[in-house]
Amino acid sequence: MLRVFFHPLSITAFVAFFIALLMAIYPTETLHSSLRGLSIWWEVLFPALFPFFVISELLLGFGIVHFFGKLLDPFMRPLFRLPGIGGFVVTMGYISGYPVGARLTAQLWAQKLITRAEGERLVAFTTTSDPIFLIGAVSVGFFQNVSIVPVLAAAHYGGGLLIGFLMRFHDTKSDSETLSRERDAQHDNQSRSPMLKVKRLSHSRIALALRSMHEARLLDGRRLGRLLQDSVQSALKLMIVVGGLVVFFSVVMEMLTHVGLVELLTEMLRLLFGMLGLPIPLADAAIFGLFEVTLGARASGTSETLLMHAVAMAAWVLSWSGLSVHAQIASLLSRTNLRYAPFLIARLLHGFIAMGLVYLLWGWLGP
């Protein structure tokens, strides 16, 4: 009986019923929080993410991703144990912000361009904030101090690259099996055509990259009009999912606040911060950032505490990403065989590494 009660599905069902009951008790607050979440999605997330989603679909269709994959392969494999095609995902993920990296990773997995282990490594360290949000919203908007940009960016993005290096040790057994299959396939091809190796060596890496791009474009086969239409439709579907999750977590946060659960968690964290010697006001930012990155970053910037500690908390919030972003990533991974657990562990590590880097780099890059 207890096993059934503590089953994850039973707990999820109970939480869903509890939230639904709170929504019925607080209908006005539910409506206002829904509108607030919808406003964030429409005014911030939609214009920021939709163009990148469309462009990423087009670049895959045109074979640009395959072009960069060939060029970056000598660098990505030794550093991160990833194919060169992952370099494109890293670039787009760091420029566009979450959840673009996870979206591209899922697409590469669907096209059988990466394995499960490679996909889990890739999504673990390409889920970062975009520079526009880090600089414009957090540094200028919330902190009103542009001088914190160097240390905050170095901690956040540097921590992400460190996570990528650490993730190279993830699921190495799967790598061994994959490399063994690749060597067997390569041996078969060379045995069928002895001149293949000589022919490949006679081409420059750029020529091979262009050839890979051309072959990918031919394999896709869609005309420009059809490709653009499919890209827009796919991006719109994903944006609707992102918007729904933002609205949902906005309502959940409002309901938990009204029943005092958020305040209870905050008080517990304040006691912990006091024991550790950390500024107590930052406990509010940590709780808000646990659920939603924007709320946590805003609370960090408005907290009345030493700037160094506030920036460190902001780095933690940006790197942890909030459960709202986690839900978006989980939604994307659900269409693949990639597991959520490695991503969760990587987010926790990234948060604390970024926080530590702020303290470490403050003397050199701090204001």
Image (spheres, rainbow, N blue to C red):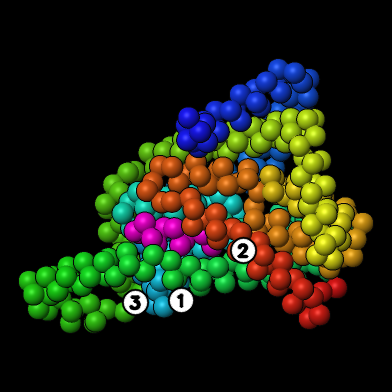
| Mark 3–mark 1 distance (CA, rounded to whole Å) | 19 Å
Residue 30 in sight here: yes
Q: Nearer the viewer, residue 328 or 86?
A: 328
**Where does label 2 land, which residue?**
350
Residue at left 44%, top 58%?
120
Residue at left 83%, top 53%?
270
Report the span colored magenta.
114-126
Residue 277 relative to residue 357: left or right:
right
Q: Nearer the viewer, mark 3 or mark 1?
A: 1
Residue 188 relative to residue 287: left or right:
left
Decide whether the magenta segment is chiefly helix, strand or loop: helix
Q: Amino acid at mark 1?
A: Leu
| Mark 1–mark 2 distance (CA, rounded to whole Å) | 18 Å
Position in image of residue 53 (x %, y %): 52, 46
Crowdedness near tag 3: few (<14), some (14–19) or many (≥20) residues, C-alpha within 10 Å: some
Earlier in the chain: of badge 3 and badge 2, it is 3
**Where does label 1 land, which residue?**
79
Q: Is residue 122 magenta?
A: yes
Position in image of residue 155 (x %, y %): 69, 69
Position in image of residue 92 (x %, y %): 53, 59
**Where does label 3 land, which residue?**
205
Residue 92 relative to residue 203: left or right:
right
Q: Amino acid at mark 2?
A: His
Position in image of residue 319 (x %, y %): 65, 59
Earlier in the chain: of badge 3 and badge 1, it is 1
Q: Secondary structure at mark 2?
A: helix
Earlier in the chain: of badge 1 and badge 2, it is 1
Task: Give the image quarter of residue 83.
Answer: bottom left
